Image (cartoon, helix red, strand yellow):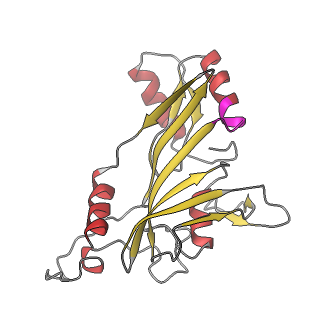
Amino acid sequence: MGGDRWDESRDRLDRLVAENFSLQKIFTVHRIDRETSGLVVFAKNEEAHRRLSISFESRDVGKRYVAVVCGRPPWKEEACDLPLVPNGNKQHMTIIDKFRGKKSFTRFVLLHGTGSYSVIEALPETGRTHQIRVHAAALGFPIACDSLYGTNQKLGEKPVLLSEIKKKWRGDPLEERPLLARLGLHAAELSLTTGDSVNLLRAPLPRDLSSLIKQIEKN
């Protein structure tokens, strides 16, 4: 994503990757929000880092995210181009600012929907901090369990429960455990163009998000 991203876990992850490949130094090319699961890209040397960084800066990289959002969008496809800028608070939030904000663009595709939650595909063409989260919330469909940008919505930051999705759920509400209790956003694919070749990188859905999406698809 963009160079304005804040991520306090980055250095720790860098060290783990370097140790795994027995390298003294690893170079970060593409990182994601701390709360987001999925693909992160590192380079083993400076030359690879330079070439990959140029690809990201020139937008020769396709990015595909899968998300669970609150509510059911009335559209099959939608786009958001609201300009974004970090607001500098302690939570490192991003806000919409038509005067100071940087150009930002995200395309959304509805994949599956129920009454309370839906599965969408997010295709960002720019890489601002929290871009997908802010744009999704601005459209009225915040990402599930988003503690920063879902608090003003009907479902907001609360965990996702099976009883909210399954029409004839008969469990005990006092013993019900959440299907998802963290941000429902996953960096699923990256397509890297180098010369005449395209490399497609994929990260499978984590178990909790995969189980939730299957329940949404069934209902």
Instruction: In the rendered view, tell whether residue 121 sits above or below residue 7.
Output: below
Q: Picture coordinates of residue 168 (x, y %)?
A: 18, 83
Q: Is residue 194 visible?
A: yes
Q: What residue appears at the point 53 percent right and 39 percent down from the top-left corner?
A: 10
Q: Nearer the viewer, residue 82 or 77?
A: 77
Q: Picture coordinates of residue 107 (x, y %)?
A: 60, 58
Give the image quarter of residue 21: top left
Quarter holding the N terminus is: top right
Instruction: In the rendered view, tell whether residue 175 sits above or below residue 189.
Output: below
Quarter holding the C terminus is: bottom left
Q: What residue appears at the point 35 percent right and 43 percent down from the top-left corner?
A: 204
Outermost right residue: 99
Q: Nearer the viewer, residue 179 or 116?
A: 116
Q: Magenta span has 210? A: no
Q: What residue appears at the point 51 percent right and 48 percent down from the top-left corner?
A: 64
- Residue range of the region highlighted in magenta in the rendering: 55-60
Q: What residue appears at the point 78 percent right and 55 percent down from the top-left corner?
A: 102
Give the image quarter of residue 116: bottom left
Give the image quarter of residue 177: bottom left
Q: Picture coordinates of residue 191 (x, y %)?
A: 53, 35
Q: Picture coordinates of residue 180 (x, y %)?
A: 33, 64
Question: Does residue 92 appear to the left or right of 101 in the view shown?
Answer: left
Question: Does residue 217 appear to the left or right of 85 in the view shown?
Answer: left
